[in-house]
Amino acid sequence: MAAALCLGAMSVFAETNPQIAAPPARTTESGTASFYADKYHGRPTASGEIFDMHQLTAAHPRLAFGTIVKVTNTENHRSVLVRINDRGPFVSGRVIDLSLAAAEELQMVKSGLVNVKLEVVR
């Protein structure tokens, strides 16, 4: 009973506190992924964090900063978990912009673009 009361209080608090992001309405998304690297390495992201192309991070237009997303390359079925820390991509038709490290995990560096499925993990 105490756990239920605690969880209930947390959900009310999350709804009234703008610092706590509400869970995303859409938990999966498909489309084209791209990646970014050298040009932005060491520069601030939209979250204020310094972009490190060697970390497993990504830019998404709407998901809350800190959201963990499983990105699956639909062509070779390789997956990677990334943390959203930036906004973008700013090219029509693209759903996520990955760091170089994430792009390497998906084996998409040579092609530059790949079809992906996104799944919000947390």
Image (cartoon, rainbow, N blue to C red):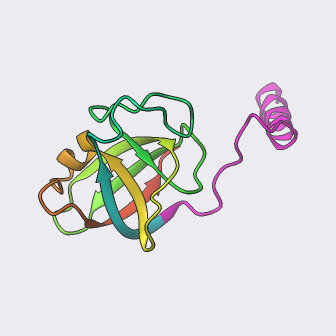
Q: Residue at x 82, y 30 (%)?
A: 1
Query: Which residue is the extreme one toward the left?
Result: 110
| Residue 75 at x, y percent in the picture | 19, 69
The image quarter containing residue 31 is: bottom left
Q: Residue at x 55, y 57 (%)?
A: 61
Chain part drawn in magenta: 1-28
| Residue 9 at x, y percent in the picture | 85, 33
Let me know if residue 22 is in the magenta part: yes
Task: Work out whether 23 lies above or below 90.
Answer: above
| Residue 14 at x, y percent in the picture | 79, 38
Task: Work out whether 114 lies above or below 106.
Answer: below
Let me know if residue 92 is in the magenta part: no
Q: Quick check: 112 left or right of 120?
A: left
Q: Quick check: 56 left or right of 84?
A: left
The image quarter containing residue 24 is: bottom right
Task: Work out whether 105 lies above or below 3.
Answer: below
Task: Work out whether 15 lies above or below 75.
Answer: above
Q: Residue at x 31, y 59 (%)?
A: 34
Q: Residue at x 60, y 45 (%)?
A: 64
Q: Quick check: 108 left or right of 89?
A: left
The image quarter containing residue 47 is: top right
Query: Which residue is the extreme one toward the bottom?
Result: 93
Q: Quick check: 2 left or right of 79?
A: right
Query: Is 92 or 96 nearer to us in this picture?
Result: 92
Number of residue marks: 0
